Amino acid sequence: MEISESKPQIDSSENPRSTWDGCSVLLDINDGDRLVFSRLSAGAKLKIGNKNCSLQPLIGCPFGSLFRVENGAEGPYLARYTPSTEVNNVQEKGDGQSIDEFRDNRALVDNNKAQSLTGEDINAMRQQGATGDEIVEALIANSATFEKKTVFSQEKYRLKKQKKYAPIVLMRRPFTRSICEAYLKKYPNKIGFLRMDTLSLLLSLANVSANSDVLVVDMVGGLLTGAVAERLGGTGYVCNTYLSGSPYSMDIARIFNFGDEICKRIVRSPLADLLSVQNGIEKPASQEAESGNMEIQSNDHISSAVSMEEASLTSENVISDPIPVSTSSPVIKMSKPAKLGEKAPQEIISSWKENGFSSLIIAAPELDAWSLLKEILPLLSNSAPFAIFHQYLQPLATCMHNLQTGKMAIGLQISEPWLREYQVLPSRTHPCMQMNGFGGYILSGTKISPN
Amino acid sequence: MLPVDPTKKLSFTRCISDGDLVIVYEKYDTMKAVEVCAGSVLGNRFGVFKHSDWIGKQFGSKVLSSKGGFVYLLAPTPELWTLVLSHRTQILYTADISFVIMFLELVPGCLVLESGTGSGSLTTSLARAVAPTGHVYTFDFHEQRAVSAREDFEKTGLSNLVTVGVRDIQGEGFPDEFSGRADSVFLDLPQPWLAIPSAAKMLKQDGVLCSFSPCIEQVQRASETMRSSFTDIRTFEILLRTYEVREWKLVDFQGDQAGSVGSHPRKRQHRSNEGSNAQETTGSPTVMARPCSEARGHTGYLTFARLKCLSFVFSRDLKALKTCASFSTCFAFQNPNLQIKMQSTALAPSPSTSFLKPPCRNSIPKAFQLLPSTSLIHVDNLTKDMIILKARAASVPESADEASKQGGLVKTLQLGSMYLLNIYFNIYNKQKLEFEGQSLFIGSGSLSISSNGHSVSVWLRDCDDYPDVGS
């Protein structure tokens, strides 16, 4: 495990498949019941149920690994595990179905008498060192109704008990998709209710590709900036612009495991600077604001550390958790996330003036789309595509209408993605019972030459 | 199409030159890809356009025809290309494409496999996602289609990012040279389940597979095949609803009647009809939006799956072995294929081991009493033969009170069924091992060894009878 310590910050273009010390990971506890972003280190801890486990064993393991809480001599620890039996269960259910057909729930009475094991029995088992799996097996063995259940509900019962007594931790790579999905589940308002399919459309419609210079107005916590930077892979630039005062938070971009090369390509600049250069004034208007700017930036670094913790802290409150939970220990050490979002150097701003940005994406729930776009569109190269996200239709409709009448852009379209997930099981395929019903609106188009 | 070559990057100074690919935009649903050639012309309903007029103009410019009509010249993007490419097959559209790219976790430098190539609509976006250092290997079993696709990628400037192969992936699988090298695999095949084992072989650990199928039956079957080596199997459907926007003055009930004359619902104003609100003279018109009534109802289901991350769990197996061994029911380790399955079955005949480790002699009867019905087998992966045995075991009294009353009988039955199961398992196991003809011999041999071991341990512990509950 210690070997990984020598591993340097890896450029994401190398696409590492295993974790290292200081690596940011997404921990999925019990198949999505709880999602926690953590930075792995020897001191990092995660509370699962009432057990505080070190995240040390996760270092050096491949992404996608599963872990379970085991009881060791020095207390509970996370151990890797392979769920081969589960899969067998599902598959061999096929054979079981003929038996299944004459079982139904007519005899099941909900009188709380089915389970003969009491809480004390279970505690006693725990004290004797029983593993979660063993408790689940015992619960099943002591359920008077288990045998009478259909195979399907037996599986459900087993899963429910497993989640409670033998929680599983799945370690995921923090990728745009997983970060977006986790945030939408936990704090949708932090990312402006931006759904993963909507985000993917923004990136496509704005033609984000290697070597491009992408201008973003990211008021969705840095998710958009991070997503663009991930696509750029250390080429081109993503410029996070803001109206005035303090820059918008880019905390979420720090959850990605960006290497130095990618971090260097994430810059920020007040819109006034970009515009003043555009107008030929060489010195940025916000010169004196620069020191203040730096201050905010350093504050921002601290707040990022806080937010990482908070992400795991508040998760318990937000997500109804069957396990008696848990706060991620404040001991989580941020082994200094790579520095990103530096102020854009003057020479780069000048080159943008000369060449224009190659894409524009706006995700600013609080800003009026038209008044912003009116200012910002001239910064784009001609024939450059843009995409604007908003939760409400009207601001985009107005913006589209004004772009049309002002002959500023063509190929204009307002679209709303519609996403539906399905449960696919033998003879039990149907759309999922729970879904997110609204992914927001996107206005997309291509800027044309003004003359 | 992609700014891989910095000199071709879109900018205020980048001008259209001879040989460039441009998208000629007439209106939002009428576009055409044209290769600029100095001596050539483009004729459409707006007139005749000379290519030579285009050269030196910026992308995004409006150009005029001989008779004064105009079109816009745009730089190609994968999204525009999807709208103009020649359909040789059914193609994927932007909503599906963008979702696939995101779910496949593609970043610059990735290696992607795709089959079939079709018209290359998705391939173009795959190439954009992995550029500049990654590569897309795409396969189609249709020779002519592959040739056309290659020509297209040459035209769009992606040929150094995409390699088109002619191969029947359903029949032959992906070439072995990509084994364990692919970050992601995309399948758009009529029988994806035939290619899934090969896709699994190609993927790196934790790599993502996507299968696109229009029919739910295909999804069903593909998902079942995926279960053996993939996890996180998720199926989605994504559609795009588009909106039309127009400015329109609604009649104000209280207001002047004159205003309503000019605000009759005009014929649908096309988007391309940019800014003709001249006749909106009275009142304040409102900009309104509504979904377009024509929409694509279905494209296909997207099934994603992640290659299972295999870990070695020797420590757990050893523990299981220890538990089994101490109970002289050691059959878990005889066949590596059955190993994990048996680990759980091994516990079945002796419920006490299911939560006690190591099983100490005092706890054995307690355990039995905690489990009075001794539904000895509740493990799912048992064969039907074993269910017969279960039925036998289930004839034991159901309630705890009864059980303690008839303790002796229960004990006998428990022990009896335990031994019966033991014998059965040993024989069954040896049969699995394909020791034809000898399974009975090995089975009974192992049983005698294990039961001798048990006797010895019982003897060593100085009791050949089980002590009382809880003592």
Image (tube, coloured by chain):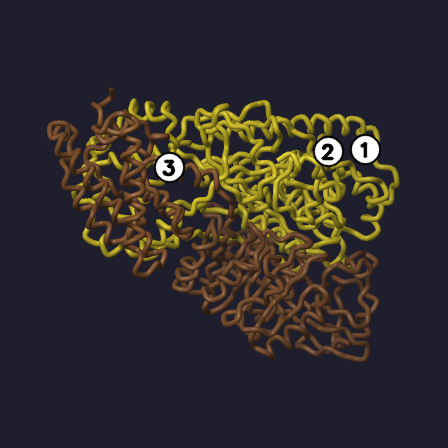
The furthest residue to the top: B471
Query: Are dots 1 and 2 on a single chain?
Result: yes
Is residue B138 shown left or right of residue B197? Answer: right
Q: Residue at x 35, y 59 (%)?
A: B434
Q: Residue B105: tell me if it is visible.
A: yes
- Numbered mark located on residue A448 in the image: none
Q: Earlier in the sequence, mark 3 or mark 1?
A: 3
Residue kind at label 3, given as amino acid type: Gln
Residue kind at label 2, given as amino acid type: Ser
Q: Residue at x 57, y 54 (%)?
A: B104
Q: Residue at x 45, y 57 (%)?
A: B226
- Per the image, the residue denoted by label 2 is A244
Mark 3 touching mark 1, by CB under 8 A? Answer: no
Instruction: Identify the secondary structure beneath mark 3.
Output: helix
Mark 1 touching mark 2, by CB under 8 A? Answer: yes
Instruction: Identify the secondary structure beneath mark 2.
Output: loop
**Colour applied to chain A:** yellow
Chain on which label 3 sits: A
Residue kind at label 1, given as amino acid type: Ser
Q: Report, in whole angstroms, how far the alpha carbon at label 1 lies from the one at label 2.
A: 9 Å
Q: Report, in whole angstroms, how far the alpha carbon at label 3 lies from the one at label 1.
A: 58 Å
- Per the image, the residue denoted by label 1 is A286
Q: Who's brown, chain-wise?
A: B
Q: Position of residue B390 (x, y in %)?
A: 21, 45
Q: Residues within 10 Å of mark 3 (few under 14, many from 20)?
A: some
Q: Report, in whole angstroms, how far the alpha carbon at label 3 lies from the one at label 2.
A: 51 Å
Looking at the image, is B197 positioned above or below residue A32?
below
Q: Residue A404: tell me if it is visible.
A: no
Mark 3 touching mark 2, by CB under 8 A? Answer: no
